[in-house]
Image: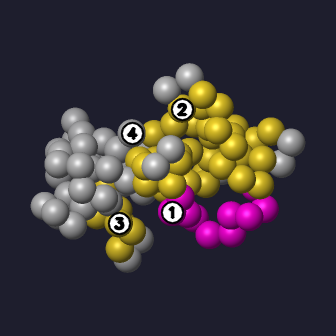
Amino acid sequence: MKEIILGAESQFAQFPAEIVVANRPYFLMKEDNGYTLMSRRCPHAGDTVELEDGELVCPMHGWTFEVHTGRCHNVPSAKLACLDVSLKDGKLVVVMP
């Protein structure tokens, strides 16, 4: 497990924010109860999920994902991987497995 600083909380103005961590694409999500780092890799075929008109969409096969949980609308047992993000001294921090 490795702790990674994503940046100062103040540097993120819009959510979901597209960021790269350990050479992998993620969305940084903000909810009332805190922050989440959500993978942008589709669990079906690994294509990069995009934000389109407020929905998370995999362009390869059209799978869509719930913005707040990453749950797939097309296959409810599938979901985007999510990691909790903590706030430490004004910085957003994630622990990567």
- Cβ–Cβ under 8 Å for marks 3 and 4: no
How would you rate the neighbour count of disc 2 (Cα within 10 Å): few for under 14, some for 14-19, many for 20 or more? Answer: few
Where does the image place residue 66, in percent across and percent down from the top left? 36, 54
Q: Earlier in the sequence, mark 4 or mark 2?
A: 4
Question: Compared to 52, does 57 lie above or below?
Answer: above
Q: CA distance from mark 1 to mark 2?
A: 17 Å
What is the span of residues highlighted in magenta in the rendered image? 9-19
Quarter residue 52 falls in: bottom left
- Residue 34 visible (yes or no): no
* Residue at horizontal 28 percent and vertical 64 percent from the top: 57
Hey, which quadrant is residue 84 in on the image? top right
Instruction: State the separation of the CA atoms marked 3 and 4.
Output: 15 Å
Can residue 12 be found in the magenta stretch?
Answer: yes
Q: Seen from this angle, which residue lies furthest bottom? A: 53
Q: Going by the image, does 12 lie left or right of 57?
A: right
Q: Amino acid at mark 2?
A: Met
Specify whether residue 9 is in view: yes
Q: Which mark is residue 50?
A: 3
Q: Residue furthest left?
A: 61
Eye-nearest disc, 2 or 3: 2
Residue at numbered disc 4: 81
The amino acid pointed to by label 4 is: Ala
Identify the residue at horizontal 24%, vertical 61% (top origin): 58
In the displayed structure, does residue 65 sit left or right of residue 21? left
Nearer-the-camera pick, 86 or 24:
24
Labelled pair 4, 2 in contact (Cβ < 8 Å): no
Name the N-terminal-most of marks 3 and 4: 3
The numbered disc on residue 96 is: 2
**Residue 71: in magenta span:** no
- Would residue 38 appear left or right of 94 to someone viewing this image? left
Question: How many marks overall?
Answer: 4
- SS under mark 2: strand
